Image (tube, rainbow, N blue to C red):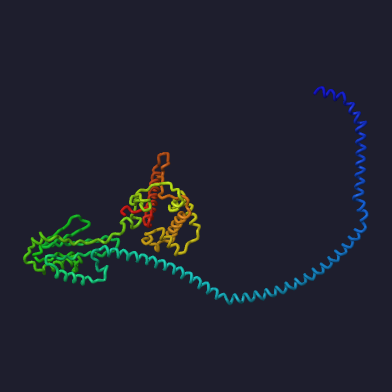
Amino acid sequence: MSDFSAWLEKNKALWTRVYDEVIGPDLEEEWKKRDEAHEKELKDSKYTPFLSRTEPNAQKEDVKRQALSNHLEDQVVENSRLRSENEELKKKLEDLSSNALSKINSDQAATGASTASDMDLADKFNDLTKKYQDLSQKIRYLERKNSTVMQKNKDMKESAPNPSSSQTTEDESAEQISRQTQFTAGDEDDMPEFVSARPLKRKRGQPSKLLPVLLVIKGQAVRLSLNPSNEKMNIWNTQASSGEEPPPADENTSRLAPLLARAKLNRKLHDSTNLDGMGSAQLSTHMPVKIKVEQNPTPPRSSAGATPASLPKKRDFKPNPAYNQGYTYAFSETVRKRGDRACLPGCTNPDCCGSTFRTFAEVQAPLPASQEDALLEDYLGEAYDNMNLTQMSAEERQELVLQARTKKMAKEAGKHREAYERRRTPPGFWRMDFPTTQEQQEDRDKSKEQEKRVVHERWLEAQRKGGKWLYRDE
């Protein structure tokens, strides 16, 4: 590299002389030739035709300007004419509008009273429609309640061995006469006893007052006084041979109870028969003891299934084998098939999917009365007839409908499904420190609320046909 730089220094003067004497003049001559050729080309292509055509173009432009000025004058005249016509039309329009307003005001004044009456009629019609819907709902509820009561009476009548006068149309006196004729026609050794299956009439929901019960024995009449509040029993024995009547049930009242009246009739029938060859001792030893016992009414389907208040514990329920594949215990498993998963109920847990479906149910439009009743009947099951839905407040009924719509939406569109929900975590389970007294009380309250919610859910399932839970005594 140093050799090349030294060579350049030596030959610099030579190359400078060559450029100045040979290369430089040649470049200048070439540049001049190109400039001359370029100028000649420009003159031939643009300026020469333009200069030749300047005079005809000027004449044409003058003609165009004259035509344009004439057109503008015509447009100005036309514009002035249109303005005058517009002003005339505006005046006519104002006159027509004033006449129309006067006519409209007169018509409104004439029809004002009719519109007010129409509004009153519409309001009255709406009020009557609401009353009709409420009354129709109450009528349907009373019809269902009446049908259930009639069915219960029918079941009690079928279950009772001897229907009473309150359950049949047959007169009680005629029944006694028929029984007396049967007694006279029968064997003398068989002493008939009138045993009634009808309990004492009492109001529902009140404890029955037990009156003295007579134990009628051949040759001996025994009177037992049973008191629920006293465990002791007072027994008075009177011999049948003495001919004395049993003491009355209540000395203050002159009328005997139905049981005592029948015992008195049995006594008279017993005394009227001819039993010469048989003593009181023989009758007492050979004849069977017949006890007249009051029969209780037929119990309901389940004593634990009356109301939610009578189900305070979770142990009062058991899994439904028909729902649980025949098993009597609850378990969790993974269901893979889509058809099997569609049969499972959707999740309504507020901590999981229930809050989302509840929000969707809240924003939906309200249902008509008929659809709302059908939804509640499907949601409550048998409890629909026992609950006083017509006596509920609007907030309680709205909350019940909201729960039913939430469950329906979870069943139709829920992805999280399971046969039985796992046990929920107890309150305060993940607390690391020792709880304070207030925290312990809060945990107890939350646990009670959680248990109430679980018991309510199981009670609803037990009321439904084919639900996942049953009562323990079913």
**Drawn side of residue 309 relative to residue 293, left or right:** right
Image location of residue 321, percent across then percent down:
35, 52
- Identify the image quadrant of residue 205: bottom left
Write the residue at 91% across / 42% down.
35
Q: Position of residue 192 (x, y in %)?
A: 15, 66
Q: Is residue 151 visible?
A: yes
Say above or below: 96 vs 472. below
154 lies left or right of 41: left
- The correct choice, above or below, for 373 with respect to 96 in the image is above
Q: Is residue 210 above or below residue 468?
A: below
Quadrant in which the C terminus appears? bottom left
User: Which residue occupies the foreground of this view, 392 or 280?
Assistant: 280
Q: Residue furthest left?
A: 277
Q: On the picture, is 163 further left or further right than 453?
A: left
Residue drawn at (55%, 76%), measured in percent from left and top?
114
Residue 252 higher or lower than 13, as above or below: below
Residue in the picture at 90% in, 36% down: 27
> How many labels, in total?
0
From the top left corner, tell me how far across and down residue 197 is, in percent.
23, 64
Residue 96, given in percent of the width and then of the height, sits at 69, 75
